[in-house]
Every structure is written in structure tokens, then in C-alpha cells.
Image (tube, rainbow, N blue to C red):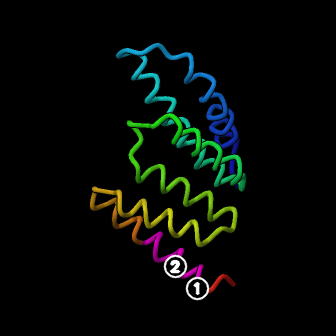
Amino acid sequence: EPGPTADLAVAIARLVPTLAVTIVPGEDGAELTAGLQRALVYGAHACAELGRADEGLALVAALDALAAPTVEAWQRAHAKALLLEAAGRLDEALAAEQAALAAAEDAECQAVLSEDVARLAGLQADPA
């Protein structure tokens, strides 16, 4: 059962696009932007946990719009895969997870993402 932390993560993430446009360029702004981008990732994961896939996909779109240099491509793709799976869109979820795997450079991340790809492929083959 998701707790209040997940709801809080979503609420904070919803504010990010508004806050992002007020950030002044520079070192402090870059640090704040990085924090906001992480908030979007956490919010997207929380949306998946709460079964609010459409809202989470909007957060991932906001993350993409920020061009999120501090959030690695595999993290964005993995968050998107979780949300697409929660929405029952298994074909798209599998494609997003495969993109995450292709973008991951760390062996430990690759191992975990490989398991997710295999799990999604199994769900896709036998959705029951």
C-alpha cells in the first residue's frame, strides 16, 4: 500500500515545471535544477506506485522538456517504462525499458534493467 510519501513526491513534482522557469542561470541555478529534475523522477516513480500512470507520464514529459542533463537517459526511460506498465501499455513499456537498458552504462544497472526487460517480455507474451 503506497503511503503519504508517494503522494508528497507527486505533489512536489507537480510544482517543478512552474519552479523551473524561475531559476536564474548560474551555478546555484544548476544545482537547483538538478534537484528539481530528481524530484520529477521520484514523482514519476511514485505515480507508478500509486497507479496514476497518466499523471506520471506528464511528469516524464516535463523531465524531457527540461532536457534533464543531470538525470541520465536510462533513468528517464526506466521511469517511463514503469508508468507505461502501470497503464497497461506493455508494448510501449517494453520498448522504453529496452531503451533504458541500451542507455545504461553501469553493469549493476544493466543487470537490473535486463531482468525488467525479461519480465516485461514475459508479461507481453502471456498477459494473463
Q: Amino acid at mark 1?
A: Ala
Which secondary structure, mark 2?
A: helix
- Asked if residue 29 lies in the magenta stretch, the reply is no
Q: How far from the left and from the top, in percent, is residue 90?
A: 61, 71
Residue 18 vertical placement versus 70 (above, below): above
- Asked if residue 117 lies in the magenta stretch, the reply is yes
Name the quadrant of the C terminus: bottom right
The residue that mark 1 highlights is 125
Instruction: Confirm or deny contact between disc 2 and disc 1 (CB under 8 A).
Output: yes
Q: Which residues are magenta?
A: 115-124
Q: How far from the left and from the top, in percent, is residue 26?
A: 37, 14
Considering depth in this image, is 45 or 19 the residue closer to the camera? Answer: 19
Q: Residue at x 62, y 57 (%)?
A: 83
Which secondary structure, mark 1?
A: helix
Q: Amino acid at mark 2?
A: Ala
Label 2 Cα crowd, 10 Å radius (few <14 / some 14-19 / many 20+): some
Q: How far from the left and from the top, in percent, is residue 115?
A: 43, 72
Name the quadrant of the N terminus: bottom right
Question: Residue 91 — which label?
Answer: none
Q: Residue at x 69, y 34 (%)?
A: 11
Q: Residue at x 53, y 53 (%)?
A: 79
Q: How far from the left and from the top, in percent, is residue 64?
A: 51, 42
Q: Is residue 90 left or right of residue 54?
A: left
Residue 31 vertical placement versus 100 (above, below): above
Q: Is residue 4 left or right of residue 119?
A: right
The residue that mark 2 highlights is 121
Instruction: State the separation of the CA atoms marked 2 and 1.
Output: 6 Å
Rendering quarter of residue 87 = bottom right
